[in-house]
Amino acid sequence: MEVIMDEVNLEARHVLRWKFRDHSRTLSGCRIDLAVTDGNERWQFECCRSEEGDNTYYIRCPAWSDFVRPRINARLTLYAKQANENFHRVRVIRRD
């Protein structure tokens, strides 16, 4: 069963960073290389724990900006890793 970490409607402000809460509580550490796939493509994002704590993280890196730009106004869902996987799944629903 896939566990949702967080969801967002991508806006122009998300090109620089996305602050999200890990509702799955599966991320650990201050800096994480977040491997993400939609089943077809794969991306690597730099992820940092927020100083606020409470399972809040930021994704902000050039790869993230490149990922978001063509997907503004889309709905993004980030899922926790499944057992025996070394990546997170992402689902993007475009709202054209």
Image (cartoon, rainbow, N blue to C red):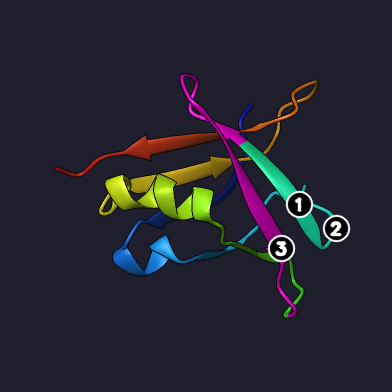
Q: Amino acid at mark 1?
A: Ile
Q: Position of residue 76 (x, y in %)?
A: 41, 46
Decide: few, some or many residues near mark 3? Use Cα within 10 Å; few <14, some 14-19, many ≥20.
Answer: some
Q: Residue at x 83, y 54 (%)?
A: 28
Q: Are marks 2 and 1 in contact (CB under 8 Å)?
A: yes
Of pointers 2 and 3, the one earlier in the residue sequence:
2
Overall secondary structure of the magenta stretch? strand
Q: Is residue 42 magenta?
A: yes
Outermost residue, front side: 62
Task: Identify the residue under disc 3.
Answer: 48
Q: Position of residue 65 (x, y in %)?
A: 44, 55
Q: Are marks 3 and 1 in contact (CB under 8 Å)?
A: yes
Q: Position of residue 85 (x, y in %)?
A: 74, 23
Q: Quadrant of the C terminus?
A: top left
Q: Is residue 44 above or below residue 16?
A: above
Range of residues picked out in magenta: 36-51
**SS at mark 3 in the image:** strand
Q: Amino acid at mark 3?
A: Cys
Task: Identify the residue under disc 1.
Answer: 32
How far is disc 2 from disc 1 in space, using C-alphas? 7 Å
Outermost residue, left side: 96
Of pointers 3 and 1, the one earlier in the residue sequence:
1
**SS at mark 1 in the image:** strand
Q: Residue at x 48, y 28 (%)?
A: 38
Q: Is residue 71 magenta?
A: no
Task: Identify the residue under disc 2.
Answer: 29
How far is disc 2 from disc 3 in space, using C-alphas? 8 Å
How far is disc 3 from disc 1 in space, using C-alphas? 6 Å
Question: In front: 85, or 62?
Answer: 62
Compared across the picture, whether 57 is left or right of 4 comes to: right
Q: Residue at x 70, y 49 (%)?
A: 24
